[in-house]
Amino acid sequence: MLKLSDLSVHYGRIAAVQHLSLEVNQGELIGLVGHNGAGKSTTLWTITGVLRPSTGTVTFDGKSLVGASPDSILRMGVSLVPENRRIFGGLTVGENLRIGTSARRDRKQAEADVRKMCERFPMLGQFFDRKGSTLSGGEQQQLAIARALLSRPKLLLLDEPTLGLAPLIVDQVFEILQELHREGVTILLVEQNAARTIEVADRTYVMRSGGRIAFQGTSKELASVGDFETAYIGMAAEHS
Amino acid sequence: MATAIQYILDSIAYGSLFALMAMGLALLFGVMGLMNFAYGELIMAGAYTMFFTRSWGWLGMIVTTLIVVTVLSLVMELVAFRPLRGASPVTLLITSFAVSYALQEFAWTDVLGLSHRFNGATIGTGPQKGVQPYPWLTQQYQVKGVLVSKLEIITVIVTIALLVGMTLLLKRTMLGIQLRASTQDFRMAQLVGVKANWVISSAFAITGVLAGAVALLYVFRTGLVAPDMGQGPLLVAFVGGVIGGLGSLSGAALGGFVLGVIINILNASLPVKLHSYSLLFAFMAVIAIVVLQPEGLIAFRRGGDWLERLWQRIRKPATEGAGA
């Protein structure tokens, strides 16, 4: 479905991502973990068309995404839940949901989906007319995920959805992700919380500083890689 | 008493014009970080359209003016600002100056066959006005001792209608939600599927309609048609927008309105000798507001303890960095 091959992205002369190859297939939940500054977010910004790769290709359903605008990439079916959620604080919860349907033409169905989303996340229905900025971090995260889902994406990208959330809320977010996964939504999950990610993901890519892939595999395969736990899970677990 | 009511009514009508202008400026500033100094030339273009269509009857004139100004606003975006998408606000600002002066200079040239008319005093010189006022519009009536003209009433009604219309558009329509979202976080708006070209063109179209309305009301009021006629009102609207806070549409509209009212009251109340200095006093008031309330007027409404903050600010001038 999504295929990155030999992708490199530079900020000026600094390489943020180098020779990254990654594949997400229909229905999979793929994890992409790594330390701060490893290039995870850069990878997502490149997929969504905000950044341009210096070399390499990004294809989605066989079509190249390089050079396409962010809104046209969304229209192709790739939706991002960005780091720090970036909900529109001055808009109400309802408006935040509605704007998630911007790319759709089936207005009636879209409105019905907004209502359905409020049933799925009852908090959103309860605070429908409240400003987005008044929600707590966990609530904002639910709103950001709901907003992204309302474009009916084929592929959902999430950038550190549990960052800065209380442990209980982190559990909630992971539950939501697993639920979506069971429903057949294809997900690329970027996380620092490696242990949890590996637990829920079908496969996980581990990024090393400088934007290279160090390992990849299922949770079992990763557990068998000798220094992996100490080098990656160990540190990540301290933070969680 | 009657005179006071008359002043107030006139000031409200005058301030309304700047509320509309400031709102147009704030919309573009919010959506794309553009402080559009060529906005004054949209008003100028509207005035010229009125001049050329003055024999078409008022309805034809109004419709044509609104269309021409809106189209010009869209063309301005397409030609000057779209190639600079994503450029820094400073680049956009300088470009807007360039567009502003280019349009002004164009109006000074002979291309439209106008300049001889300037020399021939058809436009804007002496007592002869560019666009003859409609007597039924500007004639003043005595209502309980207060002199009012239909134009003043219409100005206030049109402004209120446009403000209400803008509010409804922004709050109730998908485009409005997209515009407000883009004002807050343009990149994220794109990432949820808002088309950049669509919202920006819409913002320019809306400011075009607002500028067209301002041109109509302004020229009906003054009759003035001149290449640099947009500069003065633009400056007032810009400064008004800044005092109100360009980050919020309602704040900017309020700021424009307040400054317009202040200027009009000064115009009416200053002794004749000081008349030409009314802007001086108005901008002194602006400096006072910016010093005392740097976040913009709208911040007065938030937080109930503004009086205390104001007092602290007066007593303790900002000392940050002074010790270094």
Image (cartoon, coloured by chain):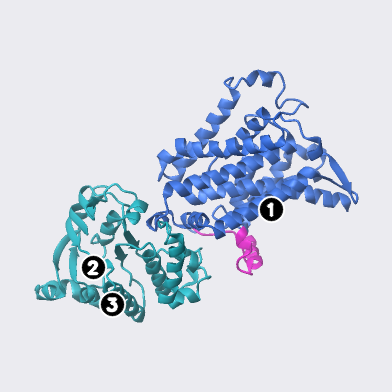
Chain colours: A cyan, B blue
Residues shaded magenta: B298-321
User: Which chain letter matches label 1?
Assistant: B
Mark 3 crowd level (few <14, some 14–19, many ≥20, 10 Å Cα): some
Where is mark 2, residue-wise?
A: A27
Label 1 sits on residue: B160
Q: CA distance from mark 1 to mark 3?
A: 54 Å
The reply to whether callout 3 and callout 2 are in contact (CB within 8 Å) is no
Mark 2 lies on a secondary structure that is loop
Q: Quadrant of residue B210?
A: top right
Mark 1 burial class by Cα count in 10 Å: few <14, some 14-19, many 20+: some
Front tag of 3 and 2: 2
Are discs 3 and 2 both within one chain? yes
Q: Amino acid at mark 2?
A: Gly
* Position above or below: B250 against A196: above
Query: Is A122 in the magenta?
Result: no
Let me know if residue B232 appears in the view: yes
Q: Which residue is labeled 3 in the image?
A: A240
B240 lies left or right of B90: right
Compared to A154, does B116 lie above or below?
above
Element at label 1: helix
Amino acid at circle 3: Ser
Report in which chain the residue with disc 3 lies. Answer: A
| Residue B307 belongs to magenta span | yes
Q: CA distance from mark 3 to mark 2?
A: 27 Å
Task: Give neighbour class at mark 2: few <14, some 14-19, many 20+ (Cα, 10 Å).
Answer: some
Residue depth check, mark 1 versus mark 3: number of the one nearer the observer: 1
How far apart marks 1 and 2 lie (CA) works out to 53 Å
Q: Position of residue B221 (x, y in %)?
A: 74, 38
Residue furthest to the right in view is B145
Tag 1: amino acid: Ile
